[in-house]
């Protein structure tokens, strides 16, 4: 039986930023909530970090937190089930639009920062290349 056939509620695709919180709130791992339903969610973590079997899933843009436990894992994706029948509020169309807009703005900002970092690295590489070339010219003249 496919996983989709076992679900009791419909999954809503989303790219919400979330946080996995455990160890009495002392440990937090950022994640992306790929899809969510009344019964659980599929989340993606940025790296292969250890995540405990039970934790709280925070969704800051919705002001929500859900007690969750892991049902399956595959590489950086984790399927979770919400404990205690925690109901997920249904997003209105305007909420979804705001979430998408906020995520787009976050990604555009991150993209801009990465481009600036690449430009800085290229300038440093050019400086190093000129130094190496200058030292090689001086070295060949001595022989």
Image (tube, helix red, strand yellow):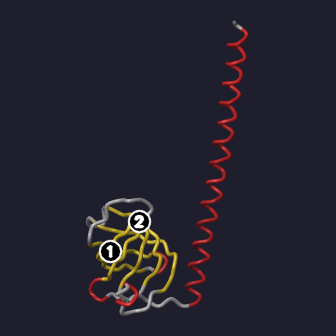
Which residue matches tag 2? 76
Which residue is drawn at the image coordinates 70% and 35% (left, top)?
Answer: 126
- Mark 2 crowd level (few <14, some 14–19, many ≥20, 10 Å Cα): few
Q: Is residue 52 left or right of residue 98?
A: left
Q: Which mark is residue 106?
A: none
> Which of the pair 84/141 is nearer the observer?
141
User: Residue 103 falls in which quadrant of the image?
Assistant: bottom right
Which image quadrant: the C terminus?
top right
Considering the numbered disc 2 on the image, is that residue within a helix, a strand or a loop?
A: loop
User: Residue 71 falls in which quadrant of the image?
Assistant: bottom left
- Mark 1 crowd level (few <14, some 14–19, many ≥20, 10 Å Cα): few
Cα separation, mark 2 vs mark 1, equals 11 Å
- Image location (x, y in percent) of residue 8: 36, 93
- Image location (x, y in percent) of residue 119: 68, 46
- Image location (x, y in percent) of residue 37: 41, 87
Which residue is drawn at the image coordinates 65% and 30% (left, top)?
Answer: 128
Which residue is drawn at the image coordinates 35% and 59% (left, top)?
Answer: 49
72, above or below 116, in the image: below
> Which of the pair 27/31 is nearer the observer?
31
Q: Is residue 129 left or right of residue 36?
A: right
User: Residue 89 falls in which quadrant of the image?
Assistant: bottom left
Which residue matches tag 1? 72
115, above or below 120, in the image: below
- Image location (x, y in percent) of residue 131: 68, 25
> Which of the pair 24/37 is nearer the observer?
37
Q: Are marks 2 and 1 in contact (CB under 8 Å)?
A: no
User: Which residue lies most toward the top here?
Assistant: 143
Which image quadrant: the N terminus?
bottom left
Q: Is residue 30 left or right of residue 68?
A: right
Considering the numbered disc 1 on the image, is that residue within a helix, a strand or a loop?
A: strand
Q: Is residue 111 left or right of residue 87?
A: right
């Amino acid at each position: 039986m496919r996983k989709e056939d076992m679900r009791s509620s419909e999954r809503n695709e989303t790219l919400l930023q979330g946080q996995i919180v455990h160890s009495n709130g002392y440990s937090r791992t950022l994640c992306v909530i790929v899809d969510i339903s009344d019964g659980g969610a599929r989340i993606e973590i940025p790296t292969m970090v250890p995540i405990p079997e039970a934790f709280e899933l925070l969704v800051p843009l919705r002001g929500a937190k859900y007690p969750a436990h892991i049902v399956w894992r595959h590489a950086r994706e984790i399927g979770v089930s919400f404990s205690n029948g925690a109901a997920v509020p249904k997003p209105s169309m305007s909420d979804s639009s705001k979430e998408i807009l906020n995520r787009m703005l976050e990604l555009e900002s991150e993209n801009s920062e990465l481009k600036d970092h690449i430009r800085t690295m290229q300038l440093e590489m050019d400086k190093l290349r000129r130094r190496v070339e200058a030292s090689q010219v001086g070295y060949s003249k001595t022989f």
